[in-house]
Amino acid sequence: MNSIIALSLFGIANLFLGFLNNRKILLPATLAFVLVALGLNLADWNQEYLWFNNMLRTNNLSVNFASVILVATFLVVAVSRGFGDDEEHTHPAEYYAIMLFSVVGAIMMVTFENLIMLFVGLEILSVSMYILTGTDKRNLRSNEAALKYFLMGAFATGILLFGIALIYGATGSFNIHGIEALVLTAAGGSAPALLYIGIVMVIIGLLFKVSAAPFHFWTPDVYEGAPAIFTAFMSTVVKTAGFAALFRLLGGAFTGVYGTWIYILYFLTMLTLIIGNITAVYQQSFKRMLAYSSISHAGYLMLTATAKVAHTQSSILFYSLAYSVATISAFAVLMVVAETKESNAEKTNENFDIFNGLAKNNPLLAFVLTVSMLSLAGIPLTAGFWGKFFIFSDAFQRGIVVPLVVAVLMSAVGIYYYFKAIISAYFKEGDVPAIELKPIYKITLIVTTLLTIVLGIAPDLVKSIF
Amino acid sequence: MQFWYFLTALTLLSALMVVLSKNPIHSVLYLVFTFFCISGHYVLLNAQFLMAVNIIVYAGAIMVLFLFVIMMLDLRRNMPDSKSNLTKLAGAILGGTLLVILVAVMRKTQFPQFSQMGGKFDTQTGMVENLGQVLFRDYLLPFELVSILFFVAMVGAVMLGKREAGERNF
């Protein structure tokens, strides 16, 4: 809760820092702001609070989710390099401010106790993302992506809001614990049909935000069109917040009518896994491949978000953390490598072939890319392996066999397209000049890589906290 | 009760005319009329504040903006291509299915009767004073945080709206 207030003020402070005409201080200031917010967030550890007339609830679960979101934000800000020295076309103060505001929305989505807070949080997060998608104003792809995202997102929000209204009509409550109690008493058969339609509509709205099939059509275009740094932000923070919200609703408020939505979700999980993984195989663009990979990771997370078992939340948290860290380092490598190619071609090139021969002159970048790809593919000794392991063992214990088999098969497909990047970095001929990295960039890359490996060797370090 | 039926028929009729009229300016004017009818429903529901806000914001500000945009676009020149029959059929089936589902749900749902809710009628429910008390006491936090939402939208509008020098690329 305090982190929400702090981040709102920091965002405004960031806009004022923009007046100083000094681009150098914005990056350290934003990093400090995120760290302060992280500290304030951790201060709520081991305490259970309800804030402002049952609007927000902070407990260990919400602190964990908010921490994962803030760590991802910190890493993304650390690799943003102050948005370059191009005075005319970038506005770092506004970008950082909007990023901080969007984290306010994300934290609201993990701490909400009232569906109104969920809606407001989701809107803050989404509106920030629409803006950040369109920040590369001279790029037509970016303009297209922003417009597409805005129109589709507004539609999904409308569906979500309609669902919330129907649930309110059926239960007379916005409070998720109130809804849970009413749903449990009504589950005997007396539940009004409005409730079921409302639940399905809310689930559709949230699945759109986490880009699960068949609501994923915006994802590849938006991820490709947005500047890479914001794609990294979008694919980590939005996904974590969306799954936190989905888990709190499915594992909490809607458990009473489990039978009505669980088979729909199993079906959508399998669809998401198959579409995400199979389509990713055919992509030439690395960024587009990462977009489809984010769809497929949504599928893995959906496999476990439907449960209400004590250790489910730790599985989701661990998976989100592993996925965020690996995705951010992949995008960080992509950004610096794509820049070396941009200077000699009009078109921005973000295909796999830009990594050709990366290892020759840039062994560090090639290693970081390799570790992140291995982690996303789920190879042992990386964090991604344990993320998948926890999710699959959860699914196995709950006896959901068919989606589990699909998930295992599809993660085998995943290895193919993740290894394409590694192969072009190490075994293909090409000329990537030695890239000079700023110290903070280098440190961030090393930290994310180390985190991936350490969590891969000793997952209990974090898993025991979650 | 008779007045309610009259108002509802008027609302539905004007809403249908929004879709059916060929001239887009007529559509907008019918939409304004629909908003007025809905405001009438708010009065019947004892929600005077919502009635006023609905007229000021929707019928006033937004629809005038809408009208300006339509007049500026010169629709006679930029007529959208009419849809193929297959699209029309698909749209009709989708919309019709949703309508059937919603009607079925409304029929099945047991809305609580007035007598079941305690039978108390508070004439002051929809007044500005009570609304303000609920808004600033029970719903203070969402009310304040919505300002962040508007602020983000404002910052984004200013940032994206500024004209950018330089070549466009793809």
Image: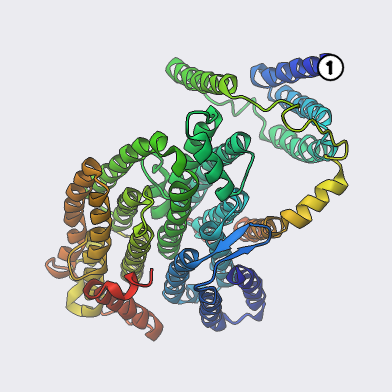
Position of residue A464 measured from the top left corner of the image (x, y, whole percent) = 33, 72
Pick whichever, A238 or A252, lies toward us.
Answer: A252
- The answer, for residue A154, to whether it is visible in the render is no
Chain of the residue displaying label 1: B
Tag count: 1
Name the residue located 44 percent from the left edge and 76 percent from the top edge: A78
A375 left or right of A106?
Answer: left
Name the residue located 26 percent from the left edge and 60 percent from the top edge: A390
In the rendered image of this protein, does residue B95 appear above or below residue A98?
above
Position of residue B61 measured from the top left corner of the image (x, y, whole percent) = 78, 41
Give, as a three-letter code, the residue at label 1.
Phe
Pick whichever, B9 or A13, lies toward us.
Answer: B9
In the rendered image of this protein, does residue B66 appear above or below residue A427?
above
A383 left or right of A100?
Answer: left
Position of residue B32 measured from the top left corner of the image (x, y, whole percent) = 77, 28
In the rendered image of this protein, does residue B57 appear above or below residue B159?
above
The quadrant of the image that shows the C terminus of chain A is bottom left
Q: Badge 1, how many Cα within 10 Å: few under 14, some, many 20+?
A: few
Colouring chosen for the image of the structure: rainbow
Pick whichever, A6 or A187, lies toward us.
Answer: A187
Name the residue located 65 percent from the left edge and 61 percent from the top edge: B155
B62 left or right of A395?
Answer: right
Position of residue A17 measured from the top left corner of the image (x, y, whole percent) = 64, 78
Q: Secondary structure at mark 1?
A: helix
- The answer, for residue A11, to whether it is visible in the render is yes
In the rendered image of this protein, does residue B7 appear above or below residue A180?
above
Instruction: Please identify the residue farthest to the bottom as the structure is shown.
Output: A439
Reading the image, the residue beneath label 1 is B3
B164 left or right of A266?
Answer: right
The quadrant of the image that shows the N terminus of chain A is bottom right
